[in-house]
């Protein structure tokens, strides 16, 4: 009797004498062992006997073996599912693009701002070539270059550059203030004028013009506008408090009432002013940077720089406040203190901007909402990004105001309102459509 027959009969189905498991190509496969319409791992699982212990232990022990030192890395089988570590090693492309988006937007804003500033410094009734602007700036900074002629130097350094720098500071202040206001109120339709800061500053400036005040010289209108803006926002905050708390709705309604009262005061000063003062008041209310000088830049510089440096420090707390007042309190945020601090920062930025440039609307509304649409609601980028974008918008707006109707000059506040009003209407329609109504 042949001894190999019992051994063959005793061997499990599918095993050869060496104990290996040959995979029989099923119907529809080619001779190379590939299966049409099935993954190779599926074939192994089907062909291997479930009673064989090696069929369960082999797939688990293979990833745990460390590669030998100096051995080349083993490519993963595309047919095998990725383990838990593989998903962490290969992040999704969409989060990677989102993480790069703030850096790309910041680079684009900085580049655009630099180009617009150089263009605005050279374009006007007295054109200065861009290369001459760069050469003059390099000469004044001690980096080489060459000065312009006497007229060119006077126009560039006494007229154009103060105006460009003032537009940059005012636009950055209004854009950053708008982002803070929308974060405080939790509403993308809020802007600094909601709580009466702009109207209060306007009352101070109009009072200084109408009453002929001059105790601070050329700084009188600026100082009066700034002090009146701070007094107005303090009054709004105190009038809206009830029981140690400040509700957002009460704050907005109080701001509306203060705005109406400030408008009445402005009308009263205009009524008692003479024709020259009326023209000055009207021109100031329309908003303009035509009277930009280096002393005015120095007047707004400390307030703007202080506000722009303080505002990003509240980004994380604004993100928590966007969850709601009650969740923010549970997460350790003192909502009342946060709201008071941010309103003071907004008052500092807005009053300083309005004091030197007049009433310029819609910058604080348009800029933060556009950036929110581009990068999301996170305030870590939104607050400083709104400052950059506000500077870009106002430098471009001032350039357009000077050049669209030469030799005349359009009021900057009128131009921003003409552009911002249709956008605001579109924004209202879009918000109403996405929310399914206001009720």
Image: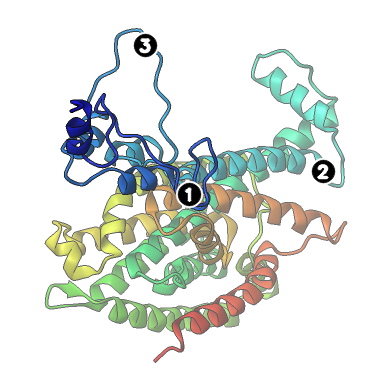
Q: Residues within 10 Å of mark 1 (few under 14, many from 20)?
A: few
The image shows residue 401 at horizontal and vertical percentages of: 75, 58
Q: Earlier in the sequence, mark 2 or mark 3?
A: 3
Residue tagged by mark 3? 71
Q: Vertically, is 14 above or below 361?
A: above
* Residue indicated by mark 1: 94
Looking at the image, residue 391 sits to the left or right of residue 116; the answer is left
Where residue 407 sits in the image (x, y, percent)? 87, 57
Judge whether 186 appears above or below 293 on screen.
below
Where is 13 relative to 136, above or below? below
Could one spot residue 306 in this view of the protein? yes
Mark count: 3
Kindly give the residue lying farthest to the bottom in the view shown: 439
Q: How many angstroms separate mark 2 from mark 3 (CA)?
A: 65 Å
Label 1, label 3: how far apart the Cα atoms are: 34 Å
Residue drawn 49% across the image and 46% down it: 35
Residue located beneath label 2 in the image: 123
Q: Nearer the viewer, residue 252 or 162?
A: 252
Q: Secondary structure at mark 1?
A: helix
């Amino acid at each position: 009797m042949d001894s190999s027959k019992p051994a063959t009969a005793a061997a499990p189905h599918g095993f050869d004498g060496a104990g290996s498991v040959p995979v029989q190509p099923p119907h529809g496969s080619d001779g190379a062992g590939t299966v049409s319409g099935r993954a190779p791992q599926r074939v192994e699982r089907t062909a291997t006997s479930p009673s064989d212990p090696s069929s369960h232990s082999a797939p688990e022990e293979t990833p745990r073996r460390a590669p030998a030192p100096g051995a080349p890395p083993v490519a993963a089988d595309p047919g095998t599912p990725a383990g838990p570590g593989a998903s962490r090693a290969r992040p999704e492309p969409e989060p990677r693009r989102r993480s790069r988006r703030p850096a790309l937007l910041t680079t684009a804003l900085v580049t655009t701002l630099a180009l617009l500033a150089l263009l605005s410094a050279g374009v006007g009734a007295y054109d200065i070539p861009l290369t001459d602007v760069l050469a003059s700036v390099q000469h004044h900074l001690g980096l080489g270059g060459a000065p312009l002629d006497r007229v060119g130097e006077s126009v560039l350094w006494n007229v154009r550059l103060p105006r460009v720098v003032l537009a940059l500071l005012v636009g950055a202040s209004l854009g950053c203030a708008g982002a803070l206001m929308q974060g405080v109120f939790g509403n993308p339709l809020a802007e600094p004028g909601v709580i009466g800061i702009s109207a209060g500053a306007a009352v101070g400036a109009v009072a200084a013009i109408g009453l002929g005040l001059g105790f601070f010289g050329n700084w009188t209108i600026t100082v009066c506008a700034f002090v009146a803006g701070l007094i107005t926002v303090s009054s709004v905050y105190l009038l809206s408090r009830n029981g140690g708390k400040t509700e957002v709705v009460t704050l907005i309604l109080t701001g509306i009432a203060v705005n109406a009262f400030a408008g009445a005061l402005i009308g009263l000063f205009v009524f008692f002013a003479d024709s020259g003062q009326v023209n000055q008041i009207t021109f100031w209310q329309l908003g303009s940077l035509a009277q930009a000088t280096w002393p005015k830049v120095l007047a707004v510089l400390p307030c703007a720089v202080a506000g722009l440096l303080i505002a990003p420090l509240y980004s994380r707390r604004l993100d928590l406040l966007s969850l709601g007042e009650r969740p923010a309190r549970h997460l350790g945020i003192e909502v009342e203190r946060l709201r008071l601090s941010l309103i003071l920062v907004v008052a500092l930025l807005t009053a300083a901007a309005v004091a030197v440039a007049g009433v310029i609307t819609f910058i604080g509304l348009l800029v933060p909402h556009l950036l929110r649409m581009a990068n999301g609601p996170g305030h870590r980028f939104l607050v400083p990004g709104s400052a950059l974008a506000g500077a870009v918008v106002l430098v471009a707006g001032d350039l357009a105001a000077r050049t669209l109707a030469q030799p005349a000059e359009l009021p900057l506040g009128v131009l921003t309102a003409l552009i911002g009003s249709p956008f605001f209407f579109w924004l209202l329609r879009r918000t109403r459509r996405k929310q399914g109504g206001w009720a």
